[in-house]
Each structure stands twice: as structure tokens, then as C-alpha cells.
Image: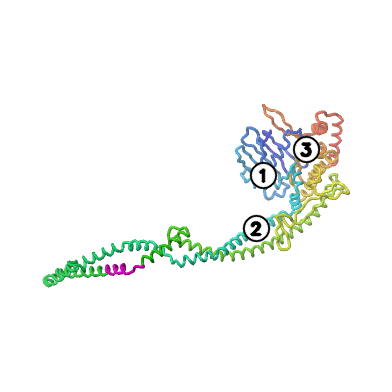
Amino acid sequence: MLVALRIENLAIIDELTISLHPGFNVLTGETGVGKSIVVNALNLLLGGKPPEGLLRTGAEEGSVEALFDLSESPLREKVGEEVLLKRVISSKGRGRALINGELATLQGLSSLAEGLLDIYGQQQHYLLRRPEQHLELLDQFGALLPLRRRYQDLFAQLRKIMGELAELERRRAEAEQRRDFLTYQVRELEEASLDPEEEERLLQERQLLAKRQQVLEVLEGVEASLYSGEGSIIEGLAGAVAALGRIASLDEAFSRWRSSLEEVRLLLEELCRDMKGYASRLDHDPGRLEEMEARLALIGRLKRKHGTKDVEGLLEVLKGLKAELRSAEDLGGAISEGRKRLREVEGELRELAIRLSEGRAEAAEALQRAMEEELKGLGMPEARFIVALKPVGKEALQVGDISLGPRGAEEGEFLFSANPGEEPKPLASIASGGELSRVMLALKGVSSRQREGQTLVFDEIDAGIGGVAAETVGQRLRELAQFHQVICVTHLPQIASQAHHHLRVRKFVREGRTVTAVEPLHGEERKREIARMFAGTKVTEATLKHVEQMLKGAGERR
């Protein structure tokens, strides 16, 4: 039960505290005094977006606090005997949510508030005119929302798997188209027997062969000066070795020097043989340059073809091509696994859809009976109310022998007839504003009995009704107050007269600013307020007497 509501800096409210009571509470007042601001403030606790201009002019922050007594609520064991909910909105766009003075997420605040508050406003006329909302109301009545959430999660999972499979199939088709091309490219690169260091070696060797004659002349000259020419170094060394040999016996040093010179001579002879061999190969392999040019041309062509700078880049390309070929083979396994998972999810989804359909069929029958009984009490004894369930249409997926949509195997729509002899037709297209008000009140009535102890807020439920219908609606609201705390904003005296507690909202100017106040009414003051609702500013004794009779009648019924 909502015990107290405190509002600061919202619209024309600077600071306002409202005490509320069990039973049926009604708020009345002239148009524009701020009655609906109270409902907007409560809607903030449910996570609603602040309407444009809700923050009081000049204020940096505005807030709403609601104290709930949970002594008779199912949430008592979880939350405690009472809970204080608060939402702060800011001109800077950053607000705060608090639960019992502790910071909380807006989702956490709204989730808790949804278990305590249920608001019916003018916008719900619009919701009743949207057939897609009817299934939501049916599932809520049948306590099917948890089952439907599981279904919707699985349906989203099915769509995801189907999307992933489609992508895998697309990639495999592309891979199949590219397979021959990839195989050719891999074979071409593998047959090239690429070596990261080969190109540099070939470039150096080509540069050498390009200057072959110069190299041969240099090598021949060096060889001649060392070995084969007249007066060569080898010849001089041979003479020096022979000379030292003649005196080697005279001193050990001479013998050691002779040995060293002999080693030098032998090294020079080996060097000269290498030079002659190198020159011979250079002189006798005329096809080597052509072979190198062909090899360099192949490497160059492959680099250009694959857009790489060097042979290492070509080897990376080869690695990638092989990986792509392997991935095409792996796609087959992934597709098989995906199809297996798809079959599993389809089976689970189909089972949930059947359970959901069975639950909806039962709930539809129960709702039809309950609604027709409820509408009788709202002055519509001949009204017929039917929940029409039909197979899902658009967005359907075929799962075996059943078509499934995002919310199950069927869509639902409320059909309605207010008069005898008239066939029920879509509620969205035929019901008047007054009929919609009573249908919604009936829906609230049948659904709220499943969850006692809530605070039900009705913002001008009297749209489009008056006279006997208004009195009937007021009586029904009073009856609802046996199970819930009811708060109603109304302009109709027939409804106001049925309330257990009457609050008047008025506005006045203080220090140059318009402010709003809420005051409880009793006795004569209440009688005059209801008379004003009947007659406006010209309240007569006859009107007062009529109101007195209404209040007395309501009291007797209570």
C-alpha cells in the first residue's frame, strides 16, 4: 500500500506531500491544477521517461518519493515491512534512482515498483485499440509470461542459429566456387620452391656474371702475380724456402722460419687453385645467366600477382591460401553441427509453443467467462467478450508441421459486442471511449484478483462515460478496493462519491509563483467539492442535497 507520496520541483509542484490510505482514494480538482502530475510522478518510479517540461522552471533537479507499507504484500519477506522508492531527474540529463536511501539502477527501481504499482491512464485506451497488445493481456491473465519469455528466448536463439547456418552455407558456396582457383594458386606457389634468401643470392650472382670479363681478368692477374707469372710470389717463396733449408741445421729459428714460409707457399698455391677453378666455372657456364634471369622473372611475376614485396610475403600468401582451403573443409563440419543444434532447438521450441498454445486456449476461455461476468457488474449485462486466437501470420517460421512467430504459434485479438443481437467484432474498431474504459476496468478487475495487495492507479478512467455508467464504474472501483489500494483521478462526481478517502488538488499563487496543494476533504467540504463537480461554480441547495443522498447511498453500500 502506498502510504505517502512526496513530490518536489515537478511542473507546478514545488513541494508536496500526500498521505494516502487503504481502500479507494480519489483525487479531484479543477482542470489544470496538477492532478495528472501525481500520476506522472508515480510513472517515474516505474522507469517512465520524464515528459518534456516536467521539471519545474528554474529547478536543477526534481524528485518523487513513495513510501510503501508491505505488511500485507507478498514482497514483505524479500524487501521488509516497508520500502522507500525515490527517483531524481536533473536538468543536466543525469538522474538517480534510490531504494531505501541506497543508490540503485533505474531497472532495479522500476522492477520493484512494478510489483507494487499498476497505472492505468488515457494511453491505455490506445493500447486496447492495438490488437498486438491483446495477446500480452491474455498471457498476463493466464500467468503465461514466464513460459512465453522462455519461448521468446528460444525463438531468438533459433533465428540466430538459422542466420549463422545461412552465413556458413554462403561461405561454403563461395569456397566451392574458389576451390579450383585456390588449388591452382597453391600448386603454383609450392612448385616455385620458394626460399626467402634465394632472391638476394640470385641478384648478387647476376651482378657478378654481368661483369664476368672484368672478374676473369682480375682473377687471372692475381693468379699470375701469385703463382704462374714470371717472378711470381710463389716462385720467390720457393727460393726463400730453399735458401733457409741450406742453413736450417745451424739454428732452430732458421728451420722454424723455413716451415712457416712453406705453409704460406702451400696456402697461396691452394688459393690460386681456387681462383683458377672459380674462373674456369665462370668461363665455362654460359647458360647460368639465362637460368638466373628466368628464376628472378618467376619470382617477380609471383610477387606482382599476389601484391607482395618479397618472397617472405609470398610464403605468407601460400600459408593463407592453404588455410582457406582447410577452412572450406572445416565449414562442412560446422554446418553439420549447426544443423544438429537447429534440430534440437526446433524440438524444444515446438514443445514450448504447444504448451503455450494449450495455456492460451484455457486462459482465453477463462478470460471470456470472467470478462462477461465483470462487464455485467459494469452496467453491460448483454456484453459479449471473445478472445479470438488465430495462426500466426507474418514473421512466421516453419518448424516441422507448425508455423511459429516471435510470440508463439498464434496471435490473439479481443472481439466485443455491447448489444444483444450484434456479432462480436474487433474491439479495436467498434468500441466507444466509454466502452473501452469499462473493458479496461473489467480487465484490471479480473487480472488484479490474481495479485492482491497492489496499488492500482486510474488516471481519468471516466473518459467517455457519465450518468449510470459512471456510477457503476465508481462502484466497481470501490469493490476493487477490497483487494487493493485504489487511487483514482476523476472529474465525475458519481465516481468521487464512491471513494473511501477524498483528496482535493488545487493551485494558487505564492510569492509570484504558481504552486499546487493537496488537502483531504471530509464532511461539508467534501460535499461541496462533489457538488462543484456536478454544477460548477453555481452550487445550489438542491445540488447539495442530491450529493448528500449519493454519499449516504455509497456509505450504505460500503
State the CA–CA distance, disc 1 to disc 2: 28 Å
The reply, left or right, for residue 283 in relation to residue 526 is left
Q: Residues within 10 Å of mark 2 (few under 14, many from 20)?
A: some
Q: How many marks?
A: 3
Q: Tell me if residue 11 comes above or below residue 453 in the rendering.
A: above
- Disc 2 versus disc 3: nearer the observer: 2
Amino acid under disc 2: Gln
State the CA–CA distance, disc 3 to disc 1: 24 Å
Q: Which residues are magenta?
A: 274-287
Amino acid under disc 3: Thr
Residue 89: x, y in percent? 63, 39
Residue 235: x, y in percent? 18, 69
Q: Residues within 10 Å of mark 3 (few under 14, many from 20)?
A: many
| Quadrant occupied by the N terminus | top right
- Furthest residue to the right? 421
Secondary element type, mark 3: loop
Amino acid under disc 1: Gly
Secondary element type, mark 1: loop
Q: Earlier in the sequence, mark 2 or mark 3?
A: 2
Secondary element type, mark 2: helix
Asked which quadrant contains residue 24, the reply is top right
User: What residue is pinned by disc 2?
Assistant: 157
Q: Which residue is at the front of the view, 173 or 88?
A: 173
Q: Residue at x 72, y 42 (%)?
A: 2
Q: Residues within 10 Å of mark 1 (few under 14, many from 20)?
A: some
Q: Tell me if residue 344 comes above or below residue 246 in the rendering.
A: above
State the CA–CA distance, disc 2 to disc 3: 46 Å
Which mark identifies residue 47? 1
The main secondary structure of the magenta stretch is: helix
Which mark identifies residue 490? 3
